[in-house]
Amino acid sequence: MTRDYSKFLPPAGSSPLPKRAPSPLQMLGWKPFFSQQTDVDTLATTPPVRVTEVHRSGLRVLGDGIDTTIPPGPEATVGDWFLLDRTNPANSILLDRISLFERRAAGHDRKRQMIAANVDTVFIVTSCNRDFNVARLERFVALAFEAQVTPVILLTKADLCDDIAPYLDDARAISNRVVVEALNAKSAEPADKLSGWCTPGQTVAFLGSSGVGKSTLVNALFQRSVADTGAVREDDNRGRHTTTHRQLHFTPDGCAILDTPGMRELQLTDVEDGIAEVFDDLVTLAGQCRFNDCAHETEPGCAVRKALDAGEIDAPRLARWRKLAAEERFNTSTLAQRKAHEKSFHKKIKSIQQKKKH
């Protein structure tokens, strides 16, 4: 028997049903992924809140009718979701993340530094001037691929450049999976060109060096000033840190926008898959080498060297791949070694304490 589903459809000629307005939580970026980690009864007693700012003194969190600060935690970053324990905020539960951006921090300690969590799209911002650096862009794209976040490269100050074609060509050559847009951050272009990614319930982040126009783009999307901006130095086109901490801003229609301090140094760790995606053609060639541990230098049967000699691949790009892969392996192994050392040290301390008790 064929069922008649027509009764479930609106009458012919009737106007479509109005779209349901997003809830306050959805306006903050709440998704089914997070609701699947809890239940109605739990939500009633521990409401969900999102981290919008991280300070040494605490985490600012927003929820449905909630705007408060909870104690800081070493495992929390901007964009995270918590189930808020109103009685004892320190016991609030951190929910699993959709995505996480992290890098290896500068300095002697070299620990992992979390940048942002639960981001849907990352706008990698650079300028059409001396700030433009393909190697740095490749690092940001690898970071995005590893986090399974959609990367979009934005070339700002296109209006101040006589010929933007070389910048567009170099940026597009990084990956055919990355959209590249050239725009004037101080015009109406950002609101128009970026609208497809900045929809209700989505979270977007701006990453890049100081002075490339990240905060200016944020303000353009809001059509008002919500982030401080500053000028760049004329001698090297570098900017000052006008954004001093990461902060989520929310548009009236419910898109979360993250502005971040400039990052000129981006040390990668645990991004092997992301690097492989950026340089997928070279990785494919390396898989055709005669030896699994081929260094792509003088080994016989090296498919990478063969392609290089034939002019099929770019020598500078090959060098960047090898450098980035080697750096990632070093950083990842160093972190693993330090974790093992810390674990051994804590075991030793615990053993000494137990002996003293006896």
Image: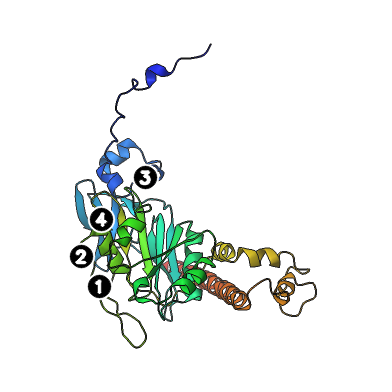
Question: Residue 101, position in %: x, y?
Answer: 43, 63
Query: How far apart are the two marked residues, 4 and 2, measured between alpha carbons?
Result: 22 Å
* Residue 47 at least partly seen: no
Taking the spot 40% from the left edge, 79% from the top edge, the residue there is 129
Tell whether label 1 touches label 2 (CB within 8 Å): yes
- Side of 260 where 356 appears, left or right: right
Is 61 located above or below residue 340 in the figure?
above
Query: How far apart are the two marked residues, 3 and 4, measured between alpha carbons?
Result: 17 Å
Q: Amino acid at mark 1?
A: Thr
- Front residue of 284/152: it is 152
Tell me, for residue 225, which label it has, or none: 2
Tell whether label 4 touches label 1 (CB within 8 Å): no
Give the foreground label among 2 and 3. Answer: 2
* Residue 300 at least partly seen: yes
Is 26 located above or below residue 308 in the figure?
above
Query: How far apart are the two marked residues, 2 and 1, measured between alpha carbons?
Result: 9 Å
Taking the spot 34% from the left edge, 72% from the top edge, the residue there is 159
Q: Amino acid at mark 4?
A: Val
- Tell me which label, 1 or 3, sits earlier in the chain: 3
Image quadrant in which you'd find residue 9: top left
| Residue lying farthest to the bottom in this orientation | 235
Q: Where is mark 1, residue-wise? A: 229
Query: How far apart are the two marked residues, 1 and 3, measured between alpha carbons?
Result: 32 Å
Q: Where is mark 3, residue-wise? A: 31
Secondary structure found at label 3: loop
Q: Where is mark 4, residue-wise? A: 61
Question: Residue 204, position in %: x, y?
Answer: 36, 57
Q: Amino acid at mark 2?
A: Ser
- Tell me which label, 2 or 3, sits earlier in the chain: 3
